[in-house]
Amino acid sequence: MDTKTFDVIVIGGGAAGFFAAINLKTKAPKLKVAILERGSQVLTKVKISGGGRCNVTHGEFIPSELSKNYPRGEKELLGPFHTFMTGDTLAWFEHRGVNIKMEEDGRMFPASNTSQTIIDCFLKEISTLGIPLLKEHPVKEIHKLDNSWSITTTKETFLAQKIVIATGSNPKIWNILSALKHTIVAPVASLFTFNIKDQRILDLPGVSTQVSVKVMGQKGKVVLQSEGPLLITHWGMSGPAILKLSAWGARILETLDYRFTIVVNWLMYKSHQEVLEDLLQLKLKNPKQTIAKYPQFDVPKRLWQSIVKTSGISTTEIWADISKNKLQNLAQQLTQSYFEVSGKSTFKEEFVTAGGVALEEVNFKTFESKIHPNLYFAGEVINVDAITGGFNFQNAWTSAYIVSKAISQELKQ
């Protein structure tokens, strides 16, 4: 096997790997930089993210607020975000002819509405900068030598002064890093939807509304809560309110084997008593109105009809005839609907895991290993993950940029 020598080898042809290599070569054009990718395709997560549009980042421009979207990594990313965050990401892409737009919920996408724009930008950059992209090169071994690293793939062996690991949630690379004495926090799913079989939502796929939702533990104790849009699906519930719970509760929900109870308040934070008083007013104001026919509180019509039916109210019943007991039931169903979760489903193709290289073993000023000098990390390979909305990509851009900055400053000397 031939041995090829580079100044820096980036392992992983995803978002973080490309961003690290491009920025490194831009800052230090004389460096020999290569990207190794195990598969025949690159940037696969970029391609499918955001339903094929690529959710590049999120419209949050205050570092302390941005970092709050990371269940693992909140404290550690605060410093890095002062160096490179949302505004820098937008400027970086726009400088390369990629315009980014922000949607109402803060998510940011290429103006073209296709992830291919981001992929084309990256491929053009590595071509212009002369960065070799070596596909179908799964890494088998990484060895530390005196002043360099030896990387053996299934095809050849490489030598490099410095290596950047940007392999995401790749168990084989985690095993190699473990052999290099790094602590790997065991991975668990972090972004997933809830499987719920319940007559109340069986015929409601596609219905979406703003809610607050709690995960209940033993003895009726609330262990997690969130708010935001909830989407009813064919298999249960999804949407930001659910995905936030899945991210923040990744470890807790895994210990429960993804079987637990949630309580949904379809009216966000209105209390049972407040809603009961509102319902009594409706009874006085609209005595002859058919309850099921006219949704209240901005509840979507199909959902309202399901809640009314669950409360024991017939489809023809009018407000004047409704009993106090049925009003109590309706208020209860609107503010405290209990559902049993019986498992999880991956959120589209955007599989994110909590887990990876232990945070205390990474220097967050440079993203260099504290155990091995000249070994750097970018993206999800470390134990950082975020809620949905472009935050995982922002972690990739930030960590990769800081890695490129640190290495270019050292190797320029």
Image (spheres, grey):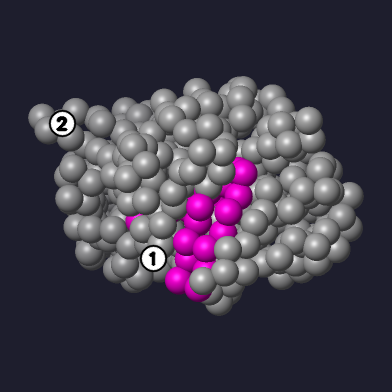
SS label for mark 2: helix
Q: In which quarter of the view is residue 120 placed?
A: bottom right
Residue range of the region highlighted in magenta in the rendering: 150-171
Q: Is residue 155 magenta?
A: yes
The three-letter amino acid code for the residue at tag 1 is Thr
Q: Which residue is drawn at 51% across and 38% down?
A: 146
Amino acid type shown at disc 2: Gly
At a point 25% along the width and 44% down the height, the residue shown is 253
Does 328 lie within the magenta span?
A: no
- Seen in the image, is 339 located left or right of residue 304? left
The residue to which callout 1 is attached is 233
Q: 29 left or right of 282? A: right
- The residue that disc 2 covers is 220
Against 405, residue 188 (above or below) is below
Instruction: Give the answer, above or below, for where 286 lies relative to 294.
Output: above
* Near-viewer residue (335 or 348): 348
Mark 2 / mark 1, whichever is N-terminal: 2
Q: In which quarter of the image is the C terminus?
A: top right
Residue 47: x percent and y percent? 61, 68
